[in-house]
Image (cartoon, coloured by chain):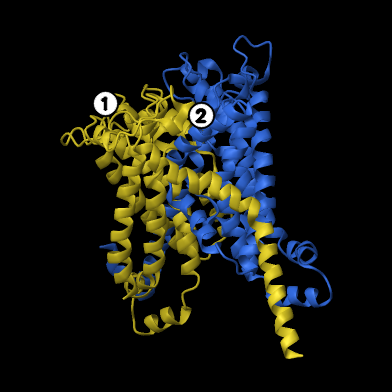
Chain colours: A yellow, B blue
Amino acid sequence: MSVAGTKKGISRKKKEAQLAWTLISPTALIVFGLVIFPAIFSVWVSFHDVGLDNLNDVFHAPFVGFENYREVINDYAFKFQGLDNWGAAVTTIVYSFASTTMAVLVGLIASLLLNRPFKGRGIARAIFLFPYVAPIVSIAFVWRWILDPRPSGVVNDILMSLNLIDLPKAYLATRGLALAIVILLDAWRYFPFCMLMILARLQAIDNTLYEAAKVDGANAVQQFFAITLPELRYVLGATFLLRLMWTFNKFDDIFLYTGGGFGTKVLPVLTYEFSFKLYDFGRGAATAMILLAILVLFMTLYVSVVMKNVED
Amino acid sequence: MKNEKKNLIGHLADWINWKRFLFSVLLIFFLTSIIFPFYWMVSSSFKTRAEIGGREPVYIPGGLRLDAYRELFDPNHPSYQNFGRNILNTLKVSIPTSIIAVILAVLGSYAIARFQFKGKNILLNGILMVYLFPGVLLIIPLFAMLAKIGDALGFRVQDNLGVLVFTYLSQTLPVALYMLTNYFRTIPDEIEQAALIDGCNRLEVIWRVTLPLSIPALISVGIYTFMIAWNEFLYALIFLNERDMFTMPIKINTIFNDPTPRPNVVMAASTIMTVPIIILFLSLEKYLAEGLTAGGVKG
């Protein structure tokens, strides 16, 4: 009886594994064909000379070793040229870290605001999510229109009537200022994601901790640093990591805000330009691989140093 | 010297007010900085050319002037944009993307959540790779691959909305799989076991038990994948060249880059693209907010 039972169990297990593969095969095929294979293929492309002319015969493209990488690293747009021209590598790092940090900080403030009960909190929470939900194309062009360099631009009009500036400024077309504005705009757009992550954790903090602190006479600021912040450390770290990863790879935002000009050229935009403006796909792939390498380096550092401390 | 007159309660009241004051100031700051751009988008779309091009910004348009919308939709307008076509293209891309992603993800994530099988970990890691890989990295090999396949099978890669749907699956399917797998894991196995003992086979169990229990998750996954395709910019920019094939984001970008700037038209097109998404989001906010943190949207 028991033998028959296990036999039956085994054949059922086999059947289930078979069914599992049937269910998952279309997905597996697409994930393999559209993600895993292209990812590996792009490593291959980065070592070959691939252009528009041999795109149809890509597997016979000549092998060029590290030539593409050498070209990228020596490219004027990539290299750090001094403080007034950072190059795409340094710009990417500064942009990603600054906008991620700001988004997490603003998200923290927003989540603390929404963690207090008040009338209309549900509506406020929904509105707070708008910047993240709305299409980036619309968002980018509204901000470009608000930051219009003519005196009729809203920001120019307000700052000039407050006498803070004398002449209208071209916010997204001035070196330095453009990068700072893009970082601010990205913090505006992506803080809601951080807010939701932090809010979920905030609402899970045991209320008795605060009651005990109140009995001990701790004020709101002391409570924040003694209870809230330590409880949030893990979620803050994880949110930072996720956002950093996504910001590193961001193309749309900078491309739409500035087109990569005025000191805002990041590696994804450079990858696009090499591949689809110069049609040098090998060099584009090499740029993307360098981007990936920098990202993996930072993530490893971050996980092994920062997140480890958090767990301790 | 006023402070001296106050008693203890007065001070306490002041302290509470100070806290409330800070809270309200911050809340108002957040709300205005969020709402103003949206107000500016919608209000600018109703402005006339004169109101847009004046020396000073017009904060409240003189009336609901439809000049900008006429340029988008009225064939008699001198610079008619045929925007209806672009809306249709976007729908033609985002609805199939969303439906295909949900159907495939239901099958796939059910298998991942319920069964043990060889190669499962490779597959899961492959899915996670999408979260790590820049879209701009995948587009190069995808473009080269599809150019070759298209050449062999005789279909056009550029200006082919079907190809675009196919490439969007690389963005949406992993997200859908990830979300649905997490959801299926929360459905207790016992319910399904009971149905199996009652003589249903697995597919019947999925159809009769699991899916009815997952309707909220299916809706939110469907809307997320729809939104990803609706908003997508980079792949559409690369794969579409003809104005008639443009999706909305690419069309808006084109109107913006027109030599004669017409911000009211850009804002009208942006309004048309944004309002449905905001309405969709608001009407299903309860389900969607959770999905956002569950890795729902990459970006």
Report whether B218 appears left or right of A118: right
Asked if residue B284 can be seen in this view, the reply is: no
Q: Residues within 10 Å of mark 1 (few under 14, many from 20)?
A: few
- Up/down of A266 relative to B247, above or below: below
- Residue underneath mark 1: A166
Q: Chain of mark 1?
A: A
- Residue underneath mark 2: B237
Horizontal and vertical percent position of residue B108:
64, 58
Horizontal and vertical percent position of residue A175:
26, 30
- Residue A104's tag is none
Q: Which quarter of the image is occupied by the C terminus of chain A?
A: bottom left
Report whether A119 appears left or right of B201: left
Considering the numbered disc 2 on the image, is that residue within a helix, a strand or a loop? helix
The picture quadrant where one finds residue A124 is bottom right
From the viewer's perspective, is the residue at label 1 or at label 2 nearer?
2
Horizontal and vertical percent position of residue B83:
64, 23
Task: Tell me which amino acid carries mark 1.
Answer: Asp
Q: Chain of mark 2?
A: B
Considering the numbered disc 1 on the image, is that residue within a helix, a strand or a loop? loop
Q: Residues within 10 Å of mark 2 (few under 14, many from 20)?
A: some
> Which residue sits furthest right?
B199
Task: Tell me which amino acid carries mark 2.
Answer: Leu
Report how far apart the C-alphas of labels 1 and 2 lie in the structure: 39 Å
Q: Nearer the viewer, residue B132 or A161?
A: B132
Tell me which residue sits at (46%, 27%) in the image.
A55
Tell me which residue sits at (31%, 59%) in the image.
A300
> Which residue sits furthest bottom?
A1
Q: Nearer the viewer, residue A114 or A19?
A: A19
Asked if residue B100 can be seen in this view, the reply is: yes
Tell me which residue sits at (38%, 43%) in the image.
A43
Q: Nearer the viewer, residue A300 or A260?
A: A300
Q: Are marks 1 and 2 on the same chain?
A: no
